[in-house]
Image (cartoon, rainbow, N blue to C red):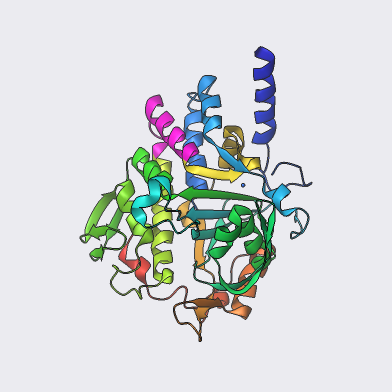
């Protein structure tokens, strides 16, 4: 038994060193809403206070679910550039099966309701987040699911990539769009998101105007709120209840970005807690809430990542929406603006700040719905 535990600890130790300081130099056989930061920070709170030892450590490891993206995608991927930066695809799953049935009818497949590319710059003291609208029409590459090839498609909505090919296809689609290799992916579903917010004790936000949206079940008067998990989920899903919004996914993205920054601040506040039971509850909930790539599929690996991101603060994270315009053939959809989109991805590929000119004429950062929440 001791030998077995020793092997497990050695394996966890090797994983904990993965990606802690930058990009991997060599590819390895096992490689996963900016919720990555908050989840990793929650796990770190537990381990750094000394509560995550022995049985607790292995129980938390058992909570995690991992998908081997490297094996699924093979070698047909962008180069793994070693410049000290880090790129993570963060997905919010909108499956209506199981515990998520209350949010609508299960139509046979989950979609990536939320997609953010988190780029952490060299030195890991600042980052950019690019939100990809789920209704963006793109050329989806061919993918493989359950051993069968799924043909690519033109003018396909971005979120169908997850539906037809799961996380690996979502990663492949983002890499095809950006030309940037994703180092990790993290996925959170509705139920896990709610439970995590409740375990954290809610998230503080102030609304300058009322929000009323029957579709997302959110009804908030103007003023200061400590949002429950249910209310938080309603906020990041709402499209119709915000004054000044256009009812599109673009307005919702601005709310999501504002919420993520508030959530990050809440997680930092958790660090002052002294109750091991409270910290364990947060870490247990966080590790159950996510699916990651296999390189992040251990508490040690998540903790290593969290430590490497410890200098990041919400004020040092620049959040934008992929530059888009409304599609001329279908105004309910958007299409990327080629020149501006190229500027965004080129900047991140070269580990530079996204220039303001990249957002010019984009419908993605207009509307001001984010100003109603702070």
Question: Is residue 60 positioned above or below 321 on the image?
Answer: above
Q: Name the side, left or right, on which 252 lies relative to 349.
A: left
Looking at the figure, which quarter contains the C terminus? bottom left
Tell me where the magenta segment starts and ends, as one range: 270-288
Q: Position of residue 58 (x, y in %)?
A: 55, 25
Does residue 166 show up magenta in the picture? no
Q: Position of residue 139 (x, y in %)?
A: 63, 72
Q: Position of residue 136 (x, y in %)?
A: 53, 72
Front one among 323 and 187: 187
Q: Name the side, left or right, on which 226 lies relative to 62.
A: left
Main secondary-structure element of the magenta-colored stretch: helix
Q: Name the side, left or right, on which 266 lies relative to 188.
A: left
Q: Name the side, left or right, on which 76 lies relative to 324.
A: right
Q: Is residue 203 visible?
A: no
Residue under the point 71% across and 41% down: 30
Work out which residue is located at the far left of the displayed protein and give it. 221
Work out which residue is located at the far top of the displayed protein and give it. 2
Residue under the point 45% across and 49% down: 189
Front one among 166 and 114: 166
């Amino acid at each position: 038994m001791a030998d077995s535990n020793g092997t497990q600890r050695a394996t966890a130790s090797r994983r904990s060193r993965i990606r802690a300081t930058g990009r991997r130099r060599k590819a390895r056989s096992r490689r996963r809403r900016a919720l990555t930061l908050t989840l990793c920070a929650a796990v770190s709170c537990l381990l750094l206070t000394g509560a995550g030892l022995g049985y607790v450590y292995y129980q938390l490891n058992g909570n995690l679910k991992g998908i081997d993206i490297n094996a699924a995608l093979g070698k047909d991927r962008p180069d793994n550039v070693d410049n000290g930066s880090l790129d993570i695809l963060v997905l919010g799953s909108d499956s209506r099966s199981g515990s998520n049935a209350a949010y609508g009818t299960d139509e046979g497949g989950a979609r990536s309701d939320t997609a953010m590319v988190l780029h952490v710059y060299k030195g890991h003291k600042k980052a950019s987040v690019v939100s990809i609208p789920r209704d963006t029409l793109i050329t989806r590459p061919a993918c493989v699911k359950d051993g069968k090839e799924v043909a690519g498609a033109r003018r396909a909505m971005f979120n169908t990539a997850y539906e037809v090919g799961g996380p690996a296809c979502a990663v492949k689609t983002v890499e095809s769009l950006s030309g940037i290799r994703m180092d990790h992916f993290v996925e959170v579903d509705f139920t896990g998101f709610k439970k995590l917010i409740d375990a954290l004790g809610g998230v503080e936000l102030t609304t300058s105007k009322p929000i009323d949206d029957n579709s997302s079940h959110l009804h908030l008067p103007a003023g200061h709120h400590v949002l429950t998990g249910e209310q938080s989920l309603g906020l990041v899903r709402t499209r119709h209840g915000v004054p000044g919004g256009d009812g599109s996914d673009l307005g919702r993205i601005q709310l999501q970005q504002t919420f993520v920054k508030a959530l990050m601040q809440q997680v930092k506040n958790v660090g002052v807690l002294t109750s091991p039971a409270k910290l364990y509850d947060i870490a247990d909930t966080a590790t159950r809430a996510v699916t990651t790539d296999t390189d992040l599929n251990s508490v040690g690996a998540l903790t290593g990542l969290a430590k490497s991101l410890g200098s990041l603060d919400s004020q040092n994270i620049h959040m934008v929406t992929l530059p888009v315009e409304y599609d001329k053939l279908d105004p309910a959809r958007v299409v990327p603006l080629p020149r501006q989109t190229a500027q965004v991805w080129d900047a991140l590929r070269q580990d530079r700040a996204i220039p303001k000119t990249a957002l010019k004429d984009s419908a993605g950062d207009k509307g001001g719905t984010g100003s109603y929440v702070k």
